[in-house]
Amino acid sequence: MQNRNCLIVGAPVESGAGRRGCQMGPEALRTAGLAEALAELGCDVEDRGDVVPPQLDEIAHGFTAKNLTETVAWTMALEQAAHQAMASGRLPIFAGGDHSLSLGTVSGVARFARDQDRPQFVLWLDAHPDFHRLDTTTSGNLHGTPVAYFTGQDSFAGFFPPPAAPVQLANICMMGIRSVDPQEHKGLLEKGVMVHDMRQIDEHGIARPLIDFLNRVRDAGGMLHVSLDVDFLEPDIAPAVGTTVPGGTTYREAHLIMEIVSESGLMTSLDLVELNPFLDHSGRTASLLVDLTASLMGKRVMDRPTRSY
């Protein structure tokens, strides 16, 4: 049964993104009524405010990576915050912030899963696989590196703290992928990561592969982290993201995924990432993320009133 005690943890990170504005994401989600929507579903909600990173001495490096020191600081702070949030017994919702926050959040929840002697699984809902290493990223934007980092890939050692409990690549399911750089493509094929791109979803539907993955999580007694990037969605319905990629999931597909995950009762933690309110239209993307989170926590389409923008 899904944990109904929720903990909102703000992660106003934008050091990993190529455009400014993601640091406003947590407050936009609060303004859009995240806590209120969960409370209406009978959830007990606690908001712990925003995580604050430590000040670190500048880290010298020879990569193209931008804002490396700041991102390392956020990773350290969020890893600790995520581990503490899991230990509280509540279901943490990490409200971001760009996707580099998952460097810390996934590492922290995975460490807690190891403490419980349970495997960590990750459902990665994104237009991008974010499988760059420090030595393969050409943009230098570190929101493209979290999956490589928390699975223990090369090049991070000596710059980032090593993940205490690297997630097994076989325990990751990516859905909605439609923008992959050549180096990422090569790495994903070599490592055998489970990727369901938009063509596969168009050809075979979204429910069957998701249900198969969730059955694996259940059979393994695993913990499930869901990482939801705004660019997973079709830009027409979710414009507030700096990395829009046409051809994303529709409103119906997105809610179907949320409802299937909800009915499984397996989700133990959640990221909401890449919301850039500066690019939004009347708060519609923040409101959609709140609706999707509500679906994850048990709300159904028949409960959802018509919304006017």
Image: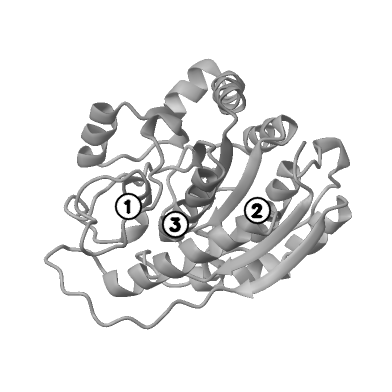
Q: Quadrant of the N terminus?
A: top right
What residue is shown with label 2? 289
Gap between marks 3 and 2, in whole Å? 15 Å
Is disc 3 placed on a helix, strand or loop? helix
Looking at the image, residue 196 sits to the left or right of residue 144; the answer is right
Question: Which residue is located at x 43 percent, y 24 percent?
Answer: 199
What residue is shown with label 3? 99
The image position of residue 203, as x and y in percent, is: 49, 17
Please name whichever residue, 22 or 269, is drawn nearer the observer in this view of the structure: 269
Within 10 Å of the Cα at label 2, are there few (<14), some (14-19), or many (20+) other Cα atoms? many
Gap between marks 1 and 3, in whole Å? 9 Å
Within 10 Å of the Cα at label 3, are there few (<14), some (14-19), or many (20+) other Cα atoms? many
Amino acid type, residue under disc 1 in the picture: Thr
Amino acid type, residue under disc 2 in the picture: Leu
Looking at the image, residue 295 sits to the left or right of residue 92; the answer is right
> Residue 190 falls in which quadrant of the image?
top left
What residue is shown with label 1? 145
N-term mark: 2 or 1: 1
